[in-house]
Image (tube, rainbow, N blue to C red):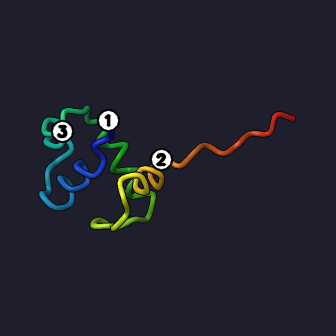
Amino acid sequence: MRKIREVLRLKFEVGLSARQIAVSVQICRATIGDYLNRFAASGLTWLCTLSDAELDQQLFPPAPAVSSE
C-alpha cells in the first residue's frame, strides 16, 4: 500500500521537509515530490475525508483510453 496519507500528514500537520519525510517514511525524495505535486494539482485540501482508495484515485487517475482505430 502506498504511504500517501502519511506523507501528506507529515507535510501539512508536522511541517517536515521532503528530505525529513523521505527518511521517516523510507521512500525517495522524488516520490515525496511527486505525491505533493499531485496533491497540489488535484485541488484537494488537507484533512480531506476521502478514503485511501478515493485519495489514490484522485491523485493517480486512470490513463485515458486510446482508440485503436
Image coords of residue 27 (percent x, y): 24, 33
Task: Give the left or right position of residue 50, taking residue 9 as reference.
Answer: right
Q: Are marks 2 and 3 in contact (CB under 8 Å)?
A: no
Residue 24 or residue 15, whichever sits in front:
24
Residue with the most extreme right position: 69
| Residue depicted at x 43% and y 57% | 54
Residue 59 or residue 50, whichever sits in front:
50
Task: Give the left or right position of residue 41, taking residue 16 as reference.
Answer: right
Image coords of residue 69 (percent x, y): 87, 35
- Give the crowd class for mark 1: few <14, some 14-19, many >=20 residues within 10 Å: few
| Residue depicted at x 24% and y 48% | 7
Task: Give the left or right position of residue 11, taking residue 59 as reference.
Answer: left
User: Which residue type carries mark 2?
Assistant: Phe
Q: Which mark is residue 25?
A: 3
Split into 4 quadrants, where in the image is the N terminus? top left
Residue with the mark numbered 2? 60
- Give the crowd class for mark 2: few <14, some 14-19, many >=20 residues within 10 Å: few
User: Which residue type carries mark 1?
Assistant: Ala
Q: Are marks 1 and 3 in contact (CB under 8 Å)?
A: no
Q: Which of the two labelled residues, at mark 1 and mark 3, occupies the earlier sequence position?
A: 3
Residue with the mark numbered 1? 30
User: Which residue type carries mark 3?
Assistant: Val
- Assign a secondary structure to mark 2: loop
Q: Quadrant of residue 55?
A: bottom left
Q: Quadrant of residue 30?
A: top left
Q: Quadrant of residue 40?
A: bottom left
Q: Are marks 2 and 1 in contact (CB under 8 Å)?
A: no
- Assign a secondary structure to mark 3: helix
